[in-house]
Amino acid sequence: MTGALLIAPFIAWQGATGDAPLPVSRIAPHGIVVVGDSITARYNDKPGDARQSWWSITADQVDADVTTFAQSGSGYLRPGEACTGDRFIDRTLAYVGPAPSVFIVEGGRNDWSVCRGSRQVTAPDPQINHAVDRYLDTLQTYLPSRTRIIILGPPWGPLDPTNGLRVTSIIQSQARSHGLQFVSMRGALTGERVVDGVHPNRAGSLAIARRVIHALDNPPAH
Protein backbone atom coordinates (compact mmCIF):
# COMPACT_ATOMS: atom_id res chain seq x y z
CA MET A 1 0.00 0.00 0.00
CA THR A 2 2.76 2.42 0.86
CA GLY A 3 4.53 1.51 -2.37
CA ALA A 4 2.11 3.73 -4.24
CA LEU A 5 3.47 6.64 -2.27
CA LEU A 6 7.10 6.10 -3.20
CA ILE A 7 8.32 9.15 -5.07
CA ALA A 8 11.69 10.76 -5.68
CA PRO A 9 13.42 11.62 -2.39
CA PHE A 10 12.96 15.14 -1.14
CA ILE A 11 16.01 15.01 1.15
CA ALA A 12 19.13 17.17 1.24
CA TRP A 13 21.82 16.25 3.72
CA GLN A 14 23.54 18.71 6.01
CA GLY A 15 26.35 18.30 8.50
CA ALA A 16 25.32 17.53 12.07
CA THR A 17 27.03 17.70 15.42
CA GLY A 18 26.30 14.01 16.07
CA ASP A 19 27.66 10.92 14.39
CA ALA A 20 25.28 11.05 11.44
CA PRO A 21 23.89 13.80 9.19
CA LEU A 22 20.35 14.98 9.70
CA PRO A 23 17.88 14.93 6.82
CA VAL A 24 16.54 18.32 5.79
CA SER A 25 13.44 18.55 3.65
CA ARG A 26 14.02 20.40 0.41
CA ILE A 27 10.33 21.12 0.13
CA ALA A 28 9.74 22.26 3.72
CA PRO A 29 13.02 23.00 5.54
CA HIS A 30 11.12 25.21 7.98
CA GLY A 31 8.34 22.70 8.47
CA ILE A 32 4.69 22.44 7.56
CA VAL A 33 1.73 23.91 9.42
CA VAL A 34 -1.69 22.33 8.94
CA VAL A 35 -4.94 23.98 9.97
CA GLY A 36 -7.90 21.66 9.80
CA ASP A 37 -10.99 19.95 11.13
CA SER A 38 -11.61 16.39 12.34
CA ILE A 39 -10.08 14.88 9.21
CA THR A 40 -6.83 16.27 10.61
CA ALA A 41 -7.58 16.28 14.35
CA ARG A 42 -8.89 12.74 14.87
CA TYR A 43 -5.80 10.97 13.55
CA ASN A 44 -2.31 10.23 14.80
CA ASP A 45 1.36 10.35 13.85
CA LYS A 46 2.13 6.63 14.12
CA PRO A 47 3.59 5.25 10.87
CA GLY A 48 1.63 2.26 9.60
CA ASP A 49 -1.17 2.67 12.14
CA ALA A 50 -4.75 2.34 10.91
CA ARG A 51 -5.39 5.87 12.18
CA GLN A 52 -2.22 7.47 10.88
CA SER A 53 -3.20 10.88 9.54
CA TRP A 54 -2.80 12.09 5.98
CA TRP A 55 -0.48 14.82 7.27
CA SER A 56 1.72 12.26 9.02
CA ILE A 57 1.97 10.15 5.87
CA THR A 58 2.86 13.29 3.94
CA ALA A 59 5.49 14.31 6.50
CA ASP A 60 7.13 10.89 6.29
CA GLN A 61 7.47 11.20 2.53
CA VAL A 62 8.92 14.73 2.47
CA ASP A 63 10.97 14.46 5.70
CA ALA A 64 9.29 17.52 7.18
CA ASP A 65 8.15 18.45 10.66
CA VAL A 66 4.42 19.09 10.86
CA THR A 67 2.54 21.20 13.40
CA THR A 68 -1.25 20.90 13.41
CA PHE A 69 -3.91 23.33 14.59
CA ALA A 70 -7.06 21.29 14.20
CA GLN A 71 -10.41 20.86 15.89
CA SER A 72 -13.34 18.59 15.11
CA GLY A 73 -16.42 20.32 13.78
CA SER A 74 -14.63 23.52 12.83
CA GLY A 75 -14.03 25.36 9.59
CA TYR A 76 -13.63 28.70 7.89
CA LEU A 77 -17.06 29.72 9.11
CA ARG A 78 -18.05 27.34 11.85
CA PRO A 79 -16.53 26.86 15.29
CA GLY A 80 -15.99 23.38 16.70
CA GLU A 81 -18.41 20.66 17.74
CA ALA A 82 -21.61 21.71 19.50
CA CYS A 83 -20.93 25.26 18.26
CA THR A 84 -18.08 25.73 20.73
CA GLY A 85 -14.35 26.07 20.13
CA ASP A 86 -12.89 28.19 17.38
CA ARG A 87 -12.77 28.82 13.66
CA PHE A 88 -9.65 28.63 11.53
CA ILE A 89 -9.11 32.38 11.73
CA ASP A 90 -9.16 32.27 15.54
CA ARG A 91 -6.02 30.08 15.64
CA THR A 92 -3.61 32.97 15.51
CA LEU A 93 -0.65 30.88 16.67
CA ALA A 94 -0.82 29.09 13.34
CA TYR A 95 -0.01 32.17 11.27
CA VAL A 96 1.69 34.55 13.73
CA GLY A 97 5.22 33.67 14.78
CA PRO A 98 7.97 31.67 13.05
CA ALA A 99 6.74 31.09 9.52
CA PRO A 100 6.73 27.57 8.07
CA SER A 101 7.84 26.67 4.58
CA VAL A 102 4.39 25.32 3.78
CA PHE A 103 0.99 26.21 5.23
CA ILE A 104 -1.84 23.81 4.38
CA VAL A 105 -5.53 24.47 5.02
CA GLU A 106 -7.67 21.32 5.20
CA GLY A 107 -11.29 22.16 5.80
CA GLY A 108 -14.70 23.23 4.65
CA ARG A 109 -16.54 19.98 5.34
CA ASN A 110 -18.40 21.64 8.23
CA ASP A 111 -19.04 24.97 6.58
CA TRP A 112 -22.33 24.01 4.97
CA SER A 113 -23.85 25.20 8.26
CA VAL A 114 -23.52 28.09 10.66
CA CYS A 115 -24.28 28.21 14.37
CA ARG A 116 -27.40 29.93 15.65
CA GLY A 117 -27.06 29.64 19.39
CA SER A 118 -26.38 25.97 19.94
CA ARG A 119 -28.08 24.93 16.69
CA GLN A 120 -26.69 24.48 13.21
CA VAL A 121 -28.59 25.97 10.29
CA THR A 122 -27.74 26.00 6.60
CA ALA A 123 -25.21 28.69 5.77
CA PRO A 124 -25.91 30.90 2.74
CA ASP A 125 -23.25 31.05 0.03
CA PRO A 126 -22.30 34.72 0.64
CA GLN A 127 -21.58 34.00 4.31
CA ILE A 128 -19.32 31.05 3.47
CA ASN A 129 -17.64 33.07 0.75
CA HIS A 130 -16.94 35.96 3.14
CA ALA A 131 -15.44 33.64 5.78
CA VAL A 132 -13.10 31.97 3.28
CA ASP A 133 -12.10 35.28 1.72
CA ARG A 134 -11.35 36.84 5.11
CA TYR A 135 -9.23 33.90 6.25
CA LEU A 136 -7.16 33.76 3.08
CA ASP A 137 -6.65 37.53 3.26
CA THR A 138 -5.44 37.09 6.84
CA LEU A 139 -2.96 34.38 5.87
CA GLN A 140 -1.53 36.49 3.08
CA THR A 141 -1.25 39.47 5.43
CA TYR A 142 0.66 37.67 8.18
CA LEU A 143 2.63 34.98 6.38
CA PRO A 144 5.74 35.98 4.42
CA SER A 145 5.81 35.50 0.68
CA ARG A 146 8.29 32.64 1.07
CA THR A 147 5.61 30.53 2.81
CA ARG A 148 3.78 28.40 0.30
CA ILE A 149 0.06 28.35 1.08
CA ILE A 150 -1.88 25.33 -0.16
CA ILE A 151 -5.67 25.12 0.04
CA LEU A 152 -7.19 21.64 -0.03
CA GLY A 153 -10.63 21.14 -1.42
CA PRO A 154 -12.68 19.72 1.44
CA PRO A 155 -12.09 15.95 1.61
CA TRP A 156 -15.79 15.15 1.28
CA GLY A 157 -17.09 11.63 1.68
CA PRO A 158 -20.25 10.31 0.00
CA LEU A 159 -22.68 11.94 2.47
CA ASP A 160 -24.39 15.18 1.40
CA PRO A 161 -22.85 15.59 -2.07
CA THR A 162 -24.92 18.70 -2.87
CA ASN A 163 -23.38 20.72 -0.07
CA GLY A 164 -20.03 19.21 -0.95
CA LEU A 165 -20.15 20.69 -4.44
CA ARG A 166 -21.46 24.01 -3.13
CA VAL A 167 -18.79 24.53 -0.46
CA THR A 168 -15.95 23.19 -2.60
CA SER A 169 -16.82 25.57 -5.42
CA ILE A 170 -16.65 28.56 -3.07
CA ILE A 171 -13.30 27.52 -1.60
CA GLN A 172 -11.80 26.78 -5.01
CA SER A 173 -12.93 30.14 -6.37
CA GLN A 174 -11.48 32.03 -3.40
CA ALA A 175 -8.18 30.14 -3.55
CA ARG A 176 -7.77 31.02 -7.20
CA SER A 177 -8.77 34.66 -6.70
CA HIS A 178 -6.08 34.92 -4.02
CA GLY A 179 -3.52 33.29 -6.31
CA LEU A 180 -3.10 30.27 -4.03
CA GLN A 181 -2.54 26.64 -4.97
CA PHE A 182 -5.76 24.63 -4.78
CA VAL A 183 -5.66 20.84 -4.49
CA SER A 184 -8.84 19.05 -5.49
CA MET A 185 -9.98 16.20 -3.27
CA ARG A 186 -12.87 15.23 -5.48
CA GLY A 187 -13.20 11.44 -5.44
CA ALA A 188 -10.54 10.92 -2.79
CA LEU A 189 -12.97 9.72 -0.13
CA THR A 190 -15.10 7.10 -1.82
CA GLY A 191 -17.49 4.87 0.11
CA GLU A 192 -14.73 2.29 0.57
CA ARG A 193 -12.35 4.89 2.02
CA VAL A 194 -14.50 6.23 4.85
CA VAL A 195 -15.70 4.73 8.12
CA ASP A 196 -18.94 6.67 8.52
CA GLY A 197 -19.55 8.40 5.23
CA VAL A 198 -17.34 11.32 6.32
CA HIS A 199 -14.08 10.35 8.05
CA PRO A 200 -11.31 8.49 6.22
CA ASN A 201 -10.10 5.02 7.02
CA ARG A 202 -6.46 4.10 6.30
CA ALA A 203 -7.11 3.98 2.56
CA GLY A 204 -8.81 7.38 2.69
CA SER A 205 -5.94 9.01 4.55
CA LEU A 206 -3.52 7.54 2.02
CA ALA A 207 -5.64 8.92 -0.83
CA ILE A 208 -5.55 12.42 0.66
CA ALA A 209 -1.82 12.16 1.31
CA ARG A 210 -1.07 11.10 -2.27
CA ARG A 211 -2.70 14.24 -3.62
CA VAL A 212 -0.93 16.49 -1.15
CA ILE A 213 2.45 14.90 -1.90
CA HIS A 214 1.85 15.33 -5.62
CA ALA A 215 0.93 18.98 -5.08
CA LEU A 216 4.04 19.59 -2.98
CA ASP A 217 6.19 18.08 -5.71
CA ASN A 218 4.49 20.13 -8.42
CA PRO A 219 4.24 23.81 -7.50
CA PRO A 220 2.03 25.85 -9.81
CA ALA A 221 3.71 27.79 -12.60
CA HIS A 222 3.69 31.57 -12.19
Image (tube, grey):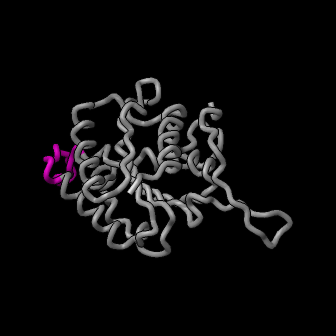
- Residue 35 coordinates in the image, percent (x, y): 42, 57
- Residue 39 coordinates in the image, percent (x, y): 43, 44
The quarter of the displayed image where residue 185 is located: top left
- Residue 219 coordinates in the image, percent (x, y): 46, 52
Of all residues shown, which one is farthest toward the right? 19
Lateral position of residue 204 relative to residue 187, left or right: right
Q: Residue at x 60, y 37 (%)?
A: 5
Which of 67 and 60 lies nearest the eye of the viewer?
A: 60
User: How many numbered marks have been drawn onto this rendered protein structure?
Assistant: 0
Image quadrant for the C terminus?
bottom left
Image quadrant for the N terminus?
top right
Of all residues shown, which one is farthest toward the front? 222
The quarter of the displayed image where residue 69 is located: bottom left
Magenta segment, which residues?
112-127
Observer able to see residue 72: no
Of all residues shown, which one is farthest toward the bottom? 97
The answer to if 4 sits in the magenta stretch is no
Observer able to see residue 163: yes
Q: Residue at x 40, y 50 (%)?
A: 106
Lateral position of residue 114 relative to residue 33, left or right: left
Which of 142 and 173 lies nearest the eye of the viewer?
A: 173
Residue 42 in the image: above or below residue 105: above
Of all residues shown, which one is farthest toward the top? 192
Q: Residue at x 31, y 52 (%)?
A: 75
Residue 43 in the image: above or below residue 132: above
The quarter of the displayed image where residue 12 is located: bottom right
- Residue 42 coordinates in the image, percent (x, y): 48, 46
Which of 209 and 87 lies nearest the eye of the viewer?
A: 209
Q: Residue at x 38, y 65 (%)?
A: 91
Residue 45 in the image: above or below residue 18: above
